[in-house]
Amino acid sequence: MSIAKTPTPPYYAVIFTNELSDQVDGYGEMADRMVELAQQQPGYLGHESVRDGLGITISYWQDEAAIAAWKQHAEHQLARQTGREKWYQTFKTRVAKVERDYGFNR
Amino acid sequence: MSIAKTPTPPYYAVIFTNELSDQVDGYGEMADRMVELAQQQPGYLGHESVRDGLGITISYWQDEAAIAAWKQHAEHQLARQTGREKWYQTFKTRVAKVERDYGFNR
């Protein structure tokens, strides 16, 4: 996992912060598949994902329409439903418009 | 670390994604101190931080003015300078306006 190579702002970030339940069978496969699928969607710009107890996954999107379309994707809808029923103890999703950025490379 | 208890949007998120260099002496103490200091700043709403190789720290703020004031804090400026000189291999900071959110608790 490395820093996403996003374009010049503005664009959107979907910040998904979560804690898993104790029923995680099938979770890893679903997570891998969702990354694979998301990367194929129109308007997908990149993602960053880290877990150490708390999980944070940020996906970057060109606009709100791209986020809405991905949310409606049938396989994603099934994953979201199973997440609520089984995998997640708690989560919060925040949709944010990235207004500016800056960076540093050694 | 748990999910930040943020208020109803709108508010701001500063998404700081980074990779450490091989010179990390003093980094942990600085990180702890910055959390302690940030929590004392006007307009601070919470933060979430996870590292597993890649580090993601998201701090939440009431408005742009609160972010600007924190960026000018003398001890934070010193930490940022040392980060560029020593601790970080690479980082990206994205400033985003959280427009909406939703969540789930089992």
Image (cartoon, coloured by chain):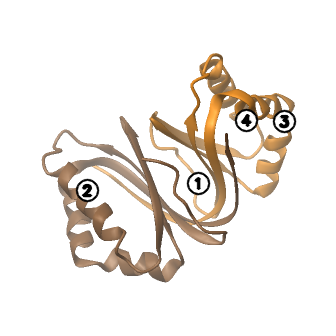
Chain colours: A orange, B brown
Q: Is residue A106 left or right of residue B54?
A: left
User: Which residue is disc 3 drawn over?
Assistant: A73
Amino acid under label 4?
A: Arg
- The residue mark sitting in front, 1 or 4, is 4
Chain under numbered label 2: B
Does label 1 or label 4 sit earlier along the sequence?
1
Amino acid under label 3?
A: His
- The residue mark sitting in front, 2 or 1, is 2
User: Which residue is disc 1 drawn over?
Assistant: A7
Distance of mark 1 from mark 3, alpha carbons?
A: 24 Å
Q: Are marks 1 and 4 on the same chain?
A: yes
Distance of mark 2 from mark 3, alpha carbons?
A: 41 Å
Distance of mark 2 from mark 4, alpha carbons?
A: 33 Å
Residue B59 versus residue A3: which sits nearer the camera?
B59
User: Which residue is disc 4 drawn over?
Assistant: A84
User: Which residue is disc 2 drawn over?
Assistant: B32
Chain under numbered label 3: A
Distance of mark 1 from mark 4, alpha carbons?
A: 32 Å
The secondary element bearing badge 4 is classed as helix
Instruction: Identify the residue shown where x is 80% and y is 43%.
Output: A71
Residue B4 in the image, given as x and y percentages of width and height: 51, 57
Q: Quadrant of residue B50?
A: top left
Q: Are marks 2 and 3 in contact (CB under 8 Å)?
A: no
Amino acid under label 1?
A: Pro
Amino acid under label 2?
A: Asp
Pointer 1 local density, CA inside 10 Å: few below 14, some 14–19, many at least 20: few
Chain under numbered label 1: A
Q: Kindly give the residue lying farthest to the front in the view shown.
A: B106
